[in-house]
């Protein structure tokens, strides 16, 4: 709405809400802080879980920041930006989602005090940018060299990641499984660096037994069963044919008519079909394959011939599973039976159909050098199995990060305290108001060790003071043992480590989200479009009501026919 010569001029749709200046900033900051507080209690090895119930009554129990924020239905636009921070952290590095959101919330809370001192948001965001750049530089300088050969370092990173999860009691075994899985699928690039695609680690989950019964299969599990009861259910020293085409007679793609004048002609057709199918099966037999994994269908008669030949067959397997099988067994995927080459068949030590709960699955395991593996997750209930899957995903991502980035830092709040101390020294070298922004950035980093202590039932201030004292004495990885409350001078020595790239990404994403929220000084929310009013008697506008003649030929009432 604007005034021109006393006459109101309507610029935006009626009902549009507009919030400007300080009010807009305060609303956005308050919404973002609420999101940060919602996940703060789930940070660290003593963090608590959240139970999330959706509108259909489905329950999720987790302490994974990204999952919590994805499941809750956030409406406020600034709060949605905080959810995006968690999503970015999860997709980039797989861990540190709660850390990034908590850090962004603390940055906004402290920036609010500078705004109240009439410091311009642009000055604050520029100071935050400099502080973030310096923080990344500091983290890089204190990092420990690691990599794919450092098996203990990889395992420790996985164990640290799972310390805060429901699987913490079984973290050693699960971290070992994740480490072996990543080492199996990692590939060396031409420049000497390593890359690990975690999509090559298949996750299969089934409730039953316990978390300790989770296992690594050096091969693949197919959610299928053998096509015919007469086929073998277990094959050792398996030579596996991976086939993309169907083992059946192809139908013509155009309409045809055949005129049959005698029963002998019908028999000739049947005999020819049988001969063609027998020829297909003979080609498979001649290749030496004793297991066939087919992406498409298999004719009943072909199944009979394959069964008589003692060949195990699995059909209608997903394309993605066929590709994983190729990487696991070393076999070539054939699209034509005429192209089969014996030395291009896949190999596995054992192919076996097993009953898991009420389902039959095909286990293909014992592969020599699998570039695709599977982790079979077990647990007491579906909710437990789902949370174990999230924990294993995080651990796989963390170990992958170490393999690819080859850097580790100590955990337990140690890198944040060290970075904050060095940032304060850096701030003193700056002139102008940006110095204040860098200082509050350093103060905001302290929220991580403070939250870890608070969630463990320790005193925040005492914990932070002890940590600062240890760091001032030169212990750059001094952290807190949250079980005993003691300060440990080297968290890396006791195996509490995290990938540097997780900390770096948390600083990047939280700083960028904070800067974006601080720069907003005007929020214009469009009015929600209203549905057209219902006419008397019900029905859509222009349609006849229940008791009268409508404008579009509704049925007249009785007596008017």
Image (cartoon, rainbow, N blue to C red):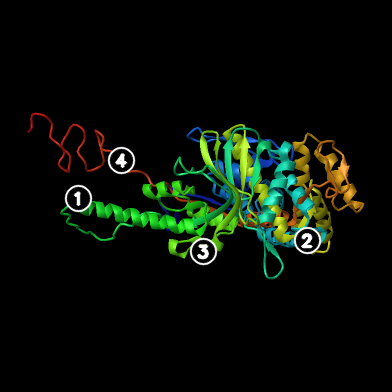
In this view of the protein, can residue 243 be seen by the observer? Answer: no
In this view of the protein, can residue 479 be seen by the observer? Answer: yes
Numbered tag placed on residue 545 in the rendering: none
Task: Report the residue marked by disc 1.
Answer: 263
Mark 2 or 1: the one toward you: 1
Measured in 3D between alpha carbons, the distance from the residue under mark 3 to the one under mark 1, in whole angstroms, is 40 Å
Q: Earlier in the sequence, mark 3 or mark 2?
A: 2
Using the image as rendered, state which of residue 194 and residue 314 is in the foreground.
Answer: 314
Residue 491 placement (x, y as % from top left):
83, 48
Task: Report the residue marked by disc 3.
Answer: 341
Measured in 3D between alpha carbons, the distance from the residue under mark 3 to the one under mark 2, in whole angstroms, is 51 Å
Task: Report the residue marked by disc 2.
Answer: 140
Q: What element carries label 1?
A: helix
Residue that sits furthest to the front in the current view: 264
Residue 190 placement (x, y as % from top left):
68, 70
Residue 39 placement (x, y as % from top left):
65, 41
Residue drawn at x 34%, y 56% is: 275
């Amino acid at each position: 709405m604007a005034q021109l010569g006393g006459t109101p001029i309507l610029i935006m749709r009626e009902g549009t809400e507009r919030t400007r200046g300080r009010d807009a900033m305060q609303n956005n900051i308050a919404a973002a802080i609420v999101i940060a507080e919602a996940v703060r209690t789930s940070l660290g090895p003593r963090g608590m879980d959240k139970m999330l119930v959706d509108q259909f009554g489905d329950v999720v129990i987790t302490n994974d920041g990204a999952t919590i924020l994805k499941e809750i239905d956030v409406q406020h636009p600034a709060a949605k930006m905080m959810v995006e921070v968690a999503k970015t952290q999860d997709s980039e590095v797989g861990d540190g989602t709660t850390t990034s959101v908590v850090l962004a919330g603390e940055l906004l809370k402290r920036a609010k005090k500078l705004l109240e001192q009439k410091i311009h948001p642009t000055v604050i965001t520029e100071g935050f940018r400099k502080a973030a750049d310096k923080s990344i530089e500091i983290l890089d300088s204190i990092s420990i060299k690691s990599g794919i050969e450092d098996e203990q370092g990889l395992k420790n990173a996985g164990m640290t990641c799972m310390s805060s999860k429901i699987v913490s009691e079984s973290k050693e075994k699960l971290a070992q499984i994740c480490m072996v899985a990543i080492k199996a699928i990692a590939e060396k690039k031409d420049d000497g660096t390593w890359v690990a695609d975690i999509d090559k680690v298949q996750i299969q989950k089934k409730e039953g037994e316990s978390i300790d019964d989770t296992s690594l299969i050096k091969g693949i599990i197919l959610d299928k069963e053998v096509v015919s009861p007469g086929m073998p259910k277990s094959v050792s020293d398996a030579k596996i044919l991976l086939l993309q085409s169907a083992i059946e007679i192809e139908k013509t793609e155009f309409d045809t008519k055949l005129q049959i004048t005698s029963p002998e002609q019908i028999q000739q057709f049947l005999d020819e079909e049988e001969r063609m199918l027998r020829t297909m099966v003979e080609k498979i037999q001649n290749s030496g394959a004793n297991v066939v994994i087919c992406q498409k269908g298999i004719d009943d008669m072909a199944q009979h011939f394959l069964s008589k030949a003692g060949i195990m067959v699995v059909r209608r397997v997903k394309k993605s599973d066929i590709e994983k099988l190729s990487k696991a067994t070393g076999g070539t995927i054939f699209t034509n039976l005429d192209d089969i080459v014996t030395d291009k068949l896949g190999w596995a030590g054992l192919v076996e159909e097993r009953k898991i709960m009420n389902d039959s699955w095909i286990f293909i395991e014992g592969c020599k050098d699998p570039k695709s593996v599977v982790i079979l997750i077990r647990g007491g209930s579906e909710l437990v199995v789902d949370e174990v899957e999230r924990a294993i995903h995080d651990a796989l991502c963390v170990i992958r990060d170490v393999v690819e980035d080859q850097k580790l830092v100590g955990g337990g709040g140690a890198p944040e305290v060290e970075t904050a101390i060095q940032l304060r020294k850096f701030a003193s070298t700056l002139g102008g108001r940006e110095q204040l922004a860098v200082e509050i950035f350093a103060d905001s980093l302290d929220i991580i060790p403070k939250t870890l202590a608070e969630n463990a039932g320790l005193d925040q201030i005492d914990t932070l003071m002890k940590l600062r004292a240890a760091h001032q004495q030169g212990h750059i990885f001094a952290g807190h043992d949250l079980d005993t409350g003691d300060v440990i001078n080297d968290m890396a020595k006791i195996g509490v480590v995290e990938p540097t790239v997780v900390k770096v990404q948390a600083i990047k994403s939280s700083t960028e989200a904070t800067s974006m929220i601080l720069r907003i000084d005007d929020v214009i929310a469009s009015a929600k479009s209203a549905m057209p009013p219902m006419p008397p008697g019900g029905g859509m506008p222009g349609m006849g009501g229940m008791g009268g003649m409508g404008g579009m030929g509704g049925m007249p009432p009785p007596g008017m026919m």
